[in-house]
Image (spheres, grey):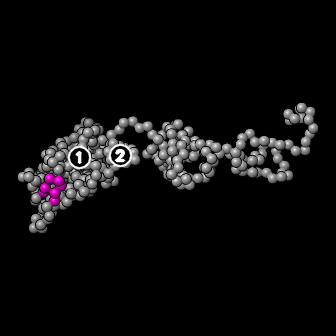
Amino acid sequence: INQLDQGEAVEPETNIYSPANGYVMKKSVSKGDYVTPEMELYEIADLSTVWVYADIYESDMASLKQDQPVTISFTAYPGKTFSGKLIYIFPNLNPETRTVKARIELPNPGFLLKPGMYGDVQIQVQAPDRLVVPSEAVLDSGLHQMVFLDRGNGLFEPRQIKMGQRYDNEIEVLEGVKEGEPIVTSATFLIDSESKLMSAASMMGMLGMGGIKMEQASMGKMEMKGMEMAGMDMKDMDMSGTEKKETPRSKKAGQLAFTLGFSPEPPHVGENKVSVKVTDPKNQIIRDADVTFAYTMTMPGMMVDEAKGSFVKEAYEGTVKFAMAGEWKIDVTIKRKGQTDVKESFNLQVK
């Protein structure tokens, strides 16, 4: 049009130039085709800078921020990495893969990167100071996560923890241990196996199998012969040498009050009747609830058994079976229609 305005001669052909340099990704016309202004004739991509779309796991979403530095490696170029930055985080989560998509801007020197390639993305996170332990120090059973505290003189104490984020070979600890407490950082499964062996020896004695001779189990300097350790009764001691304490049998959880009882009292090895009386803030007995008793020994690797409670007179009663003497934990769960479930835990000594 500018050429016509300048009075130059009309040419039968007109050159139309692309506004950007790049590669032809799509060609929609051929020689002799009729075109209109709204038609897309060519698709031209400038590959000097490319976009990489990364799928970020849901557990890592909280660490994402715009403009974070990113390093990407591609199988096509072993040992070579490419640096870019995160420029956009999509607002929606993929419900099938439980990932969120992030867009990364990446310079493409030498046009080595091709559309459709796959790579591994590492996003550099500036995390605050947090308490972490080596990943091999955590014993994860699926239901519980444990570490072993070193109490000295060959004594170890199992401690349940609450885990947070994972960082390479380290795990964040939210609850359970404090900074400076010494823990076992390797071979925790061996210590766990030792504790289970000692429990098995104790159980055989409780079941009347004293005629079967078992090899002496030891853990460091801690030795077990029969039911005694250096002249002390094992029933009332834990691995750290601390005397076990029972929790009160009456507790309050939310708006409800729990009173736990056993028959016989104190509870013993074998079958026991357990009961719980549940009252509201006005001291009225709750009669319309579903009650469950979940009980297990307070040591790593022990299974949880359950018993249902039935309302009898003023309390919910059930039958539990304790396999051996020692400290047990029993969780009482109250479920009522249209209301939030209420749970309370009790520790007790089985003789």
Image quarter in which the C terminus is found: bottom left
Extreme top residue here? 6
Q: Nearer the viewer, residue 46 or 246?
A: 46
At label 1, the amino acid type is Leu
Percent position (x, y) of residue 282? 25, 36
Query: The residue tagged with tag 1: helix, strand or loop?
Result: strand
- Kindly identify which residue carries mark 1: 149
Q: Position of residue 257 (x, y in %)?
A: 24, 40
Q: In this orientation, which residue lies closer to the viewer: 148 or 21?
A: 21
Q: Is residue 7 left or right of residue 208?
A: right
View extreme (left): residue? 231
- Give whichever of 146, 267 is nearer the camera: 146
Q: Residue at x 36, y 36 (%)?
A: 129
Q: Is residue 265 left or right of residue 278?
A: left
Instruction: Identify the residue position indicated by label 2 in the image.
Output: 171
SS class of the residue under badge 2?
strand
Q: Name the dominant secondary structure of the magenta segment.
A: strand
Residue 231 sits above or below residue 342 on the image: below
Ranked by sequence position, the earlier of labels 2 and 1 is: 1
Q: Which mark is residue 267?
A: none
Q: CA distance from mark 2 to mark 1?
A: 16 Å
Q: Residue 188: where, in percent of width, then height?
A: 26, 53
**Which amino acid type is marked by label 2?**
Ile
On-image quarter of the N terminus: top right
Q: Is residue 237 above or below residue 196?
A: above
Residue 39 is inside the magenta segment: no
Q: Nearer the viewer, residue 200 or 29?
A: 29
Per the rendered image, the range of residues in magenta is: 217-224
Residue 198 falls left or right of residue 169: left
Q: Is residue 218 magenta?
A: yes
Left or right of 166 in this view: 342: left
Residue ID at (18%, 55%): 219
